[in-house]
Image (cartoon, rainbow, N blue to C red):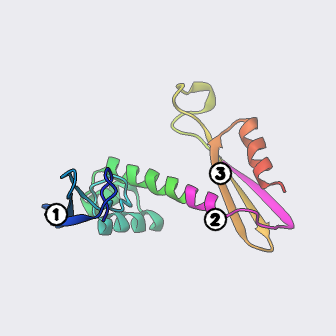
Amino acid sequence: MTCHNCRIECKRKGRDRKGNQRYQCHQCRKTFQEPREKPLEGMYTPLNKAEQILKLLVEGASISTIERVTDVHHTTILKLLVLVGEKCNRLMGRLIVNVPVKDVQCDEIWGFCQKKEANKWPFRASFVLWRSFSAPPAVIVPRIALRHWYAQASFLKLCSP
């Protein structure tokens, strides 16, 4: 392990209260730890509990059912859902690039949150899920956006060669 400031080799200096190895620099006397991977990005929920929550979400269980079964607050479940969705979006954006396709079929699924367009508050918005199915390599490209013509045009531009 090398020091972040001095760039010299450091020696081990005990462990922290969670059992992680600590290091100390000989020259500047600063102590630090190796950078750890944070798959849940700061959430305190254990990984096995998060995995159980995601399995229940995939199975179609409601948020209140998951809250009752796992003893995890509903806002934590929703934060985990948003976090996993963002990570999946980044993964798909990195992996699905330059896929050659012959035919593309685009579908639109429309929904709204609490109220219809004419009676809604400014912070409530209708949304659209566009899905693109391609063949022969079967790739599904989803995109959720507000229901405006420019969002649809940007999705069609994404699907075009």
In the image, residue 108 lies at what x, y percent? Answer: 72, 51
Q: Mark 2 points at which residue?
A: 95
Would you say residue 150 is visible in this rendering? yes
Would you name the residue on which mark 1 appears?
A: 18
Q: Is residue 107 above or below residue 136?
A: above
Q: Nearer the viewer, residue 138 or 42?
A: 42
Is 137 located above or below residue 24 in the figure?
A: below
Chain part drawn in magenta = 90-109
Q: Residue at x 41, y 62 (%)?
A: 61
Callout 2 touching callout 1 (CB < 8 Å): no
Residue 135, how many percent across, how many down? Answer: 80, 70
Judge the density around disc 2: few (<14), some (14-19), many (≥20) Cα neighbours within 10 Å: few
Question: Along the line of sight, which residue is nearer the eye, 61 or 154?
Answer: 154
Query: Which label lies toward us, 3 or 2?
Result: 2
Q: Name the residue under label 3.
A: 143
Q: Residue 44, image x and y in percent? A: 27, 55
**Mark before the other along the chain sequence, 2 or 1:** 1
Residue positioned 71% across, 40% down in the render: 151
Res 89 → quadrant: bottom right
Q: Nearer the viewer, residue 17 or 95?
A: 17
Q: In which quarter of the image is residue 147?
A: top right
The foreground one among 31 and 64 is 31
The percent coordinates of residue 37 (x first, y second) are 36, 62
Q: Is mark 3 on a helix, strand or loop?
A: strand
Q: Does the magenta stretch include residue 151?
A: no
Q: Residues within 10 Å of mark 3 (few under 14, many from 20)?
A: some
Q: Give the Cα distance between marks 1 and 3.
A: 41 Å
State how far apart marks 2 and 1 are (Cα): 35 Å
